[in-house]
Image (tube, rainbow, N blue to C red):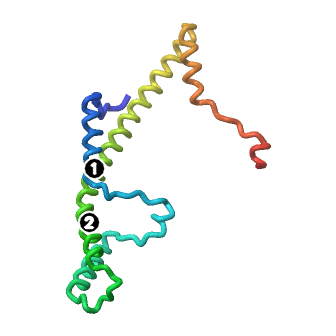
């Protein structure tokens, strides 16, 4: 078996504390919204290259406000730009945390699957001589059963 990279337990108290801390983070940002896929698709995106463009336009709108028609709310524009800039630093930290969670889950899951494969091979061997093991190996084998496509399903 390969090297075990993850050997940890997240006890219930720590898990609860983490979830409570995340709830507090959400409480500090009650303005967060969730867009639908359609809304996300339709939205004009502000990527890394657009930050300077937006910031310069804000500066221009503030410096030359007389050129901007009254239907353009420069104060709201300024709030949006400020919020994006503030959330960017938060996002970087959250993204790094999520990457660590994802990588740890991937590694621990991979290790668990490798060990499960090894255990299954031993149980299958043991089932040949120990009738008591046949039940659990049959249950485990259900994971590997493939559904056969019928010709009627293929025609649909």
Residue count near mark 2 (Cα–Cα under 10 Å), binned few <14, some 14–19, many ≥20: few
In the rendered view, tell whether residue 103 sits above or below residue 55.
Answer: above
Residue count near mark 1 (Cα–Cα under 10 Å), binned few <14, some 14–19, many ≥20: few
Residue at the image point whose x is 78% and y is 49% from the top? 155
Q: Quadrant of residue 151?
A: top right
Residue at the image point whose x is 29% and y is 50% from the top? 26
State left or right for residue 110 relative to residue 9: right
In the rendered view, tell whether residue 54 sits above or below residue 4.
Answer: below
Q: Earlier in the sequence, mark 1 or mark 2?
A: 1
Contact, mark 1 vs mark 2 (Cβ under 8 Å)? no
Q: Residue furthest left?
A: 63
In the rendered view, tell whether residue 134 sits above or below residue 24.
Answer: above
The label shown at residue 147 is none
Secondary structure beneath label 1: helix
In the rendered view, tell whether residue 24 sits above or below residue 54.
Answer: above
Quarter holding the N terminus is: top left
Residue nearer the viewer, 62 or 135: 62
Q: How many marks?
A: 2
State left or right for residue 152 relative to residue 8: right
Residue nearer the viewer, 84 or 112: 84
Pinpoint residue 124: horizontal percent, then vertical percent.
54, 18
Secondary structure beneath label 2: helix
**Which one is in front in this view, the residue at disc 1 or the one at disc 2?**
1
Q: Quadrant of residue 81?
A: bottom left
Residue at the image point whose x is 40% and y is 35% from the top? 109
Residue that label 1 marks:
27
Pinpoint residue 111: horizontal percent, then vertical percent.
38, 32
Residue that label 2 marks:
83
């Amino acid at each position: 078996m390969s090297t075990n990279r993850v050997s940890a337990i997240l006890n219930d108290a720590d898990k609860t504390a983490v979830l409570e801390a995340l709830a507090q983070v959400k409480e500090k940002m009650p303005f967060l919204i969730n867009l639908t896929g359609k809304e996300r698709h339709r939205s004009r995106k502000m990527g890394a290259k657009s930050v300077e463009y937006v910031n310069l336009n804000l500066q221009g709108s503030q410096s030359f406000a007389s050129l901007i028609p009254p239907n353009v709310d420069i104060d709201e524009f300024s709030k949006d730009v400020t919020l994006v800039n503030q959330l960017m630093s938060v996002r970087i930290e959250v993204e790094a945390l999520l990457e660590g969670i994802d990588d740890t889950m991937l590694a621990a899951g991979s290790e668990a699957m490798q060990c499960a494969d090894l255990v299954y091979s031993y149980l299958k061997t043991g089932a040949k001589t120990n009738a008591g093991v046949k039940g659990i190996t049959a249950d485990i084998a259900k994971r590997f059963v493939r559904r056969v496509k019928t010709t009627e399903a293929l025609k649909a």
